[in-house]
Image: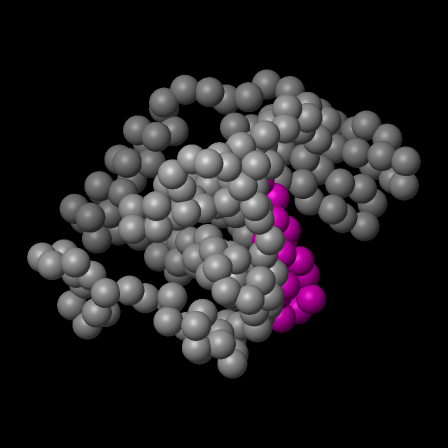
């Protein structure tokens, strides 16, 4: 994968889990600090500019942490889940996949609680998603996921990638949407478009 054409694993598969994590946490702002580490283990020697495994920690102004991990080289998922989210609460934790399966573990010993092992697979959700988007374009009706929500989720991909490419740990102003004291990182927040493609006013 090359930076001119994509965003690596975090922007390919990772965005779906980051979006669910931000939604589940009720996050309405961008993080104030991003720490990223990664390396190439499976793709070493292959033509790619991205790490194939990555760990990114996002710290929010209220102190909450969102931690993204991508280790595709292992077959050992947490409690049998190959991907998804883990939410830690005051009385236990819950794991769920993006396809509807979940497991709850309660108390300090992680006693198994409610579980739904069935995953919802198929193309129906994609068709409904596209229909909602096209309806919004045609009739100017809002989508369930607003542009602000999509921006915050997609920004996590770019903030993690920029932290990985620069210092590894960056402080960020979530209101100004700029990195603090790192011109190298701020320069990566936008890029020069190749003609004839571009967005007027954005470079």
- In which quadrant will I find the N terminus? top left
Picture coordinates of residue 119 (x, y %)? 55, 21
Up-down relation of residue 25 to residue 114 (above or below): below
* Camera sees residue 2: yes
Instruction: Classify residue 62 by image quadrant.
Output: bottom right
Q: Is residue 158 left or right of residue 130?
A: right
* Start-end of magenta stretch: 55-70
- In which quadrant will I find the C terminus? bottom left
Residue that protrudes farthest toward the bottom in the picture? 181
Most prominent secondary structure in the magenta stretch?
Answer: strand
Residue that protrudes farthest toward the left in the picture? 196
Instruction: Classify residue 57 by image quadrant.
Output: bottom right
In reply to whether residue 30 is colored magenta, the answer given is: no
Instruction: Classify residue 133 by image quadrant.
Output: top left
Q: Is residue 20 left or right of residue 111?
A: left
Picture coordinates of residue 106 (x, y %)? 83, 36
In reply to whether residue 64 is colored magenta, the answer given is: yes
Residue that protrudes farthest toward the front in the picture? 45
Picture coordinates of residue 150 (x, y %)? 40, 53
| Residue at x 72%, y 27% (from the top left corner) | 79
| Residue at x 24%, y 47% (from the top left corner) | 136
| Residue at x 45%, y 46% (from the top left corner) | 50
Q: Is residue 160 left or right of residue 107?
A: left
| 126 or 68, nearer to the observer | 68
Up-down relation of residue 95 to residue 152 (above or below): above
| 7 or 124, nearer to the observer | 7
């Amino acid at each position: 994968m090359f930076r001119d054409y994509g965003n690596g694993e975090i922007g390919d598969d990772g965005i779906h889990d980051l979006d669910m994590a931000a939604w589940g946490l009720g996050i309405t702002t961008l993080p104030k600090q991003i720490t990223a580490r990664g390396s190439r283990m499976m793709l070493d020697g292959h033509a790619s500019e991205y790490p194939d495994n990555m760990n990114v920690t996002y710290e929010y102004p209220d102190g909450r942490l969102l931690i993204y991990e991508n280790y595709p080289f292992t077959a050992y998922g947490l409690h049998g889940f190959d991907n998804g989210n883990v939410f830690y609460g005051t009385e236990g934790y819950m794991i769920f996949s993006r396809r509807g399966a979940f497991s709850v573990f309660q108390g300090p010993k992680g006693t198994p609680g409610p579980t739904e092992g069935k995953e919802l697979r198929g193309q129906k959700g994609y068709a409904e998603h596209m229909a909602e988007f096209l309806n919004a374009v045609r009739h100017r009706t809002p989508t369930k996921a607003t542009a602000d929500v999509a921006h915050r989720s997609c920004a996590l991909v770019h903030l993690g990638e920029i932290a990985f490419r620069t210092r590894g740990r960056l402080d960020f102003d979530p209101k100004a949407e700029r990195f603090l004291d790192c011109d190298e990182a701020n320069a990566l927040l936008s890029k020069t478009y190749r003609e004839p493609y571009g967005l007027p006013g954005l470079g």
